[in-house]
Each structure stands twice: as structure tokens, then as C-alpha cells.
Image: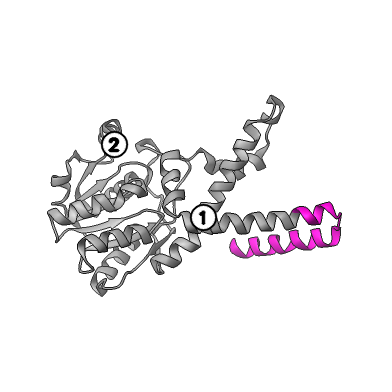
């Protein structure tokens, strides 16, 4: 898989890391970039993440276009690119899928060169400086096929992700958003909330240990990106919050009753499942 040109819209952590991986693996002769933030675009050029700055018309002429912007703007870029060039293959890497897929298909129809995917990789850092080669090695990539998506387009998406070192899984856009409402979006809600709680305490509460730092690491993530995610996946996020609050209430009840046997069993079940998740 070798491309004459790849366009990256949004040259931050994910978009920039895709560009660097493509360069490292010699999968593209040229990588061009666009970002609404001119400082980010200039920095990406300085860092060698992209070879050239481009406008949207120029980006649309690329063999492949990767849209890696906050999720609220992804569908706009996809539609704009494909209206300029129906033959372009456009991938988005947002962590919410169904609203984006629905918007694109409503405006362009199902016979469209669009591949919705979600690389399960990242850090709490953002911007071009956060991008690095190797981010996607052995990471999962979820592709969410939609009704009318051709087998050839799906295979292209799988091949693209695998060439970046990722392990591909597929699920429907609806299931994706429900799953990641629990395993990604809810943990960010909890981390942000916990940091807010401690920030309102006296200065002595700033003496936090490694556990607090590890648990709340993601609260240093981009507020622009995550506010978009919470709002775009609102239904699933609210459902996850409600279930979490019910579980927290039950946990509180066990402590209030000083029921050590139940407390030990509750903690044990969590520990065993966590070890299983970690393999």
C-alpha cells in the first residue's frame, strides 16, 4: 500500500501520529495537512509531520484523506471533501461514530467513499508536539461499517489500519458509541469530576500520590475535544453516568453498614475482572 499523497485534516496527536507512522513506514510519497489553527499547521510543518500546508480544495485531490478534528466538525469536512472529489477515500478517526455516519449518509447517500474508524490509542497530551511515531503499534482499531458500505472499502480501511500496526475489529456505529460511552467516555467524566472535587479543597489536598495522578491522568486532555465527545454521545454518556452513580451508591451502602465480607467480595470481583482485562 503506497499512496502518492495523503491529506491530514487536524494535525494534532492522532492526525500527526498517523502522518509520522505513514512516513516511517514509507507508505506515502507526500503528506499534506490542513488545520483551522494556523499555529498548529505551521508547527506540524516545522516538526516534519507534514510536507506541505494545504487548503481543503488541495486536500481533496489526495489519494486518501484522514479527518482528525474534534468530533463536532468531522462530518462537515467529510462532506466538503467528497463533494469536491467523490473518488477520494476519506477516513475519520473520531471516538464517536453514529452521529457522524448518519450525517454523512444523509447528505451524500450510502454509495460514498467514507470509512468510519476509531484507533484506540492516544495520550492526555494534544497538539502537533504530542504526535509521535509508533502510537498505533498493536493498538486496536474499530471500524464501524454502515448499510451500503462496499466490501472493497471495508477491506481498504482494514488494510490502512493494519499497515499502521493496528489490530482491526468491527462493530456497528450504534454499538461502538454505547461501548465507548462506558469504557472511555465515562472514565473521562469521572477523572474530570474527581479533579474538580479536589481543586475546591484546601491546599493540603494538593499532596496527591501516584494513584491519584494515574487515575486522573486523562483529565489533562483537551477540553475542546472532550466537550464535543460528551455532547455528541450524550445519550450513552448519561446512561453510563446513571449506572455508575447507582453502583457508587451501592458501594457507599456497603461501607455505611461496615459489611466487610460484602466489601471484600465487591473488591475481589473488581480485581479479578481487571486482571482478566489486562490479560
Quarter-wise, where is residue 109 in the image? Answer: bottom left
Give me the disc on residue 44. Answer: 2
Magenta highlight on residue 254: yes
* Image position, residue 161 (x, y; %): 33, 61
- Which is more N-terminal, label 1 or label 2? 2
- Quadrant of the image for the C terminus? bottom right
Which residue is at a point 41% across and 54% down the rendered structure image?
A: 95
* Image position, residue 150 (x, y; %): 24, 73
Quarter-wise, where is residue 243 in the image? Answer: bottom right
Which residue is at a point 30% across and 43% down the rendered structure image?
A: 10
Label 1 element class: helix
Quarter-wise, where is residue 168 in the image? Answer: bottom left
Which residue is at a point 61% across and 45% down the rendered structure image?
A: 215
Determine whether label 2 and label 1 are within 8 Å by CB: no
Would you say residue 244 is visible in this rendering? yes
- Near-viewer residue (279 or 11): 11
Q: Which residue is mark 1?
A: 237
Query: Is residue 125 found left or right of 110 in the rendered image?
Result: right
2 vs 1, front mark = 1
Q: Residues within 10 Å of mark 2 (few under 14, many from 20)?
A: many
* Image position, residue 255 (x, y; %): 81, 53
Would you say residue 26 is visible in this rendering? no
Which residue is at a point 25% across and 35% down the rendered structure image?
A: 45
Magenta highlight on residue 24: no
Label 2 element class: helix
**Span of residues in magenta:** 252-279
Query: Is residue 1 found left or right of 269 in the rendered image?
Result: left
* Image position, residue 28 (x, y; %): 21, 52
Q: Residues within 10 Å of mark 1 (few under 14, many from 20)?
A: many
Query: Is residue 279 found left or right of 91 in the rendered image?
Result: right
Give me the disc on residue 273. Answer: none
Q: How many marks?
A: 2
Amino acid at each position: 500500500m503506497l499512496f502518492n499523497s495523503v491529506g491530514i485534516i487536524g494535525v494534532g496527536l492522532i492526525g500527526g501520529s498517523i502522518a509520522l507512522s505513514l512516513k516511517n513506514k514509507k507508505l506515502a510519497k507526500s503528506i499534506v495537512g490542513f488545520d483551522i489553527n494556523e499555529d498548529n499547521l505551521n508547527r506540524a510543518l516545522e516538526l516534519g509531520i507534514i510536507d506541505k500546508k494545504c487548503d481543503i480544495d488541495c486536500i481533496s485531490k489526495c489519494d486518501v484523506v484522514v479527518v482528525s478534528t474534534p468530533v463536532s466538525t468531522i462530518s462537515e469536512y467529510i462532506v466538503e471533501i467528497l463533494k469536491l472529489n467523490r473518488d477520494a477515500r476519506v477516513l475519520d478517526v473520531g471516538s464517536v461514530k453514529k452521529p457522524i455516519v448518519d450525517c454523512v449518509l444523509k447528505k451524500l447517500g450510502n454509495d460514498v467513499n467514507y470509512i468510519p474508524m476509531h484507533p484506540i490509542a492516544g495520550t492526555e497530551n494534544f497538539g502537533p508536539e504530542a504526535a509521535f511515531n509508533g502510537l498505533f503499534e498493536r493498538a486496536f482499531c474499530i471500524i464501524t461499517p454502515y448499510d451500503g458500505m462496499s466490501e472493497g472499502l471495508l477491506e481498504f480501511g482494514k488494510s490502512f489500519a493494519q499497515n499502521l500496526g493496528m489490530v482491526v475489529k468491527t462493530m456497528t456505529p450504534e454499538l461502538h458509541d454505547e461501548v465507548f460511552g462506558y469504557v472511555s467516555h465515562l472514565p473521562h467524566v469521572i477523572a474530570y469530576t474527581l479533579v474538580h472535587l479536589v481543586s475546591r479543597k484546601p491546599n493540603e489536598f494538593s499532596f496527591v500520590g501516584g494513584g491519584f495522578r494515574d487515575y486522573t491522568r486523562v483529565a489533562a486532555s483537551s477540553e475542546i475535544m472532550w466537550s464535543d465527545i460528551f455532547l455528541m454521545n450524550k445519550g450513552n454518556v448519561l446512561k453510563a453516568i446513571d449506572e455508575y452513580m447507582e453502583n457508587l451508591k451501592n458501594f457507599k451502602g456497603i461501607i455505611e453498614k461496615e459489611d466487610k465480607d460484602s466489601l471484600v467480595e465487591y473488591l475481589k470481583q473488581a480485581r479479578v475482572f481487571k486482571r482478566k482485562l489486562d490479560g
